[in-house]
Amino acid sequence: MFGRQPLNRSGSFRAENLGQNAMAMIGNLCFTLFVLGVLIFTIIAATYQPEDPLFHPSTKLTTFLTSTSNATFRSDETVLKTGEDFMPSNQSAFGTFINATDVALSDSATTTALVPDCDLNSRIDCTDPEVFHLLMRSAIDKFQDIHFYRFGKSVPGPDDNTCDLAWRFRPKEGKTASFYKDYRRFVISRSDNCTYSVISIGDYHSGVNARKKRKNQKPGFESTAKGTEASAPVQVIGEAVNDSLPVVASEGKFKSGRYLMYSGGGDRCKSMNHYIWSFLCALGEAQYLNRTLVMDLSICLSSMYTSSNQNEEGKDFRFYFDFEHLKESASVLDQSQFWTDWGKWQKKDGLTLHLVEDFRITPMKLRDVNDVFIMRKFGSVEPDNYWYRVCEGEAESVIQRPWHLLWKSRRLMDIVSAISARLNWDFDSVHVERGEKARNTELWPNLAMDTSPANLLATLREKIDDGRHLYVATNEPDVSFFDPLKDKYTTHFLQDYSDLWDENSEWYLETKKLNNGVPVEFDGYMRVEVDTEVFLRGKKQIETFNDLTSDCKDGINTCRSTS
């Protein structure tokens, strides 16, 4: 028999290895405890839900809207700041991030407010926070189809029981990036126990005392947005308009500037789309060359828009477009002002002119020109004398037309906002374009049938509910043509709101002042601008058959609306 063999001991159990094994085990244990701690912390962090002062209705946001305390409000305009203040300029995704209309209010809180220690015979204190709360809650209750974004401070009205309040808003179902501003007059009653309640809210822009007054600005000319493309801010409709002409502050500023002018050509008295297409080419080249565009603010209005059926000179650019936005976002100078300064300082300072008489000389070839003034002079042969030819061919991929700089006139947009407000921003719209073909039932029976009231009514029945307010945007002068629609809808037309531009209107007085005291006609192009913009604000928008030749004529193949 063999003797018993001794057990083989692994080298790891040798005495000399015990210290190393102990250290390894301690290290593994510490790592395990660390991982376990991280896991526990992660679980706690993922499941913990602290009270959020922004989204919990039991916290200060709701308390603010229902409080009866003597709170004070501090900001640049003493305003309630809501979602607008957190919103990027052109992103509507944040439109309901913080919205006063989303806050639940009790029925009693929306109609009355208790003001302690009041004098029944005194004027209502519109600056009292409780009165402000009352006005704000009343507006939120009354105007259900808009989102409020900012309230201004409440100010006294003309009578002891009236207060004026302004706010900024957007339609709940609006499709534009613009903010609107309204200011209304509130009539307030006061009971014996010092309880206040709102008994009426005035019409659109009735609270004129709450309208923001623009501070006087020192005249001066600044060359802005050179070499860069400025981001377009959100347009605010309803603010005071400052479209005064920019001036050059000094001789030094003038001679240090660089200028571009387009002169002559066949663009004058063409359609407005033609004018826009050419003007934006000039503005795009000026930005590409880092130069100030010297522009002629006097427009020739095509006969297609005039009541005289004749081309009409002397129309001001500011009648149709927002010059305030343009001059603040781009470097522009009025032509008459430029020539005055050029005459004073050109010889004295040795300012040089670079003349270009061929549109085929591309903007890229002018990048290295050092002369103070570049003038593109266009001849008399059409279409080679159209301004937009500069931006064709090789330059097309280089010059970007800055559409974001050309907005419609804020005075006209205020009319749009007034019409929409009278319709409580709760209406549908239809666009019916009729031309000679549609009206000539003998030569074009099929087209006449396409735009007939019966066919139109059949189309609308499928898309718009009976009884809705329907705004009809149309070039048809005889609106009785649409009488059959009245059986199903409450119809509205642009001409129904002519008081917004008649001789007693704010638009009439402001444009008359702008036109050196001469009354301004509400012409065909203005009607198209307003009609189109009201149509775009309908909750449902129905386009119908359009038998007219496109207004994008004279070699232009792109129509763009300015907003």
Image: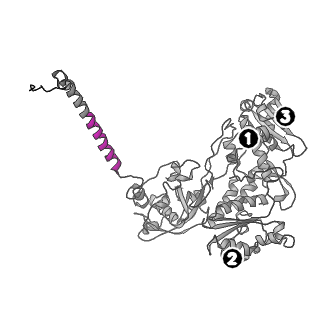
> Over which residues does the magenta segment extend?
30-50
- Main SS, magenta region, reads helix
Taking the magenta stretch, the answer to whether it contains residue 35 is yes
Against 454, residue 147 (above or below) is: above
Circle nearer the N terminus (2, 1): 1
Which label belongs to residue 197? Answer: none
Against 128, residue 280 (above or below) is: above
Q: Quadrant of the N terminus?
A: top left
Label 1 near label 3: C-beta < 8 Å? no
Per the image, the residue denoted by label 3 is 356
Give the CA separation, mark 2 to mark 3.
59 Å
Residue plotted at (59% across, 53% down): 212
Per the image, the residue denoted by label 2 is 486
Circle nearer the N terminus (2, 3): 3
Q: Determine which quarter of the picture holds residue 505.
A: bottom right
Label 3 SS: strand
Which label belongs to residue 284? Answer: 1
Q: Which kind of residue does numbered mark 3 sit on? A: Val
Residue plotted at (80% across, 38% down): 261
Give the CA separation, mark 3 to mark 1.
17 Å
| Horizontal arrangement in the rendering, residue 78 relative to residue 117 (left or right) | right
Against 368, residue 283 (above or below) is: below
Q: Which kind of residue does numbered mark 2 sit on? A: Lys
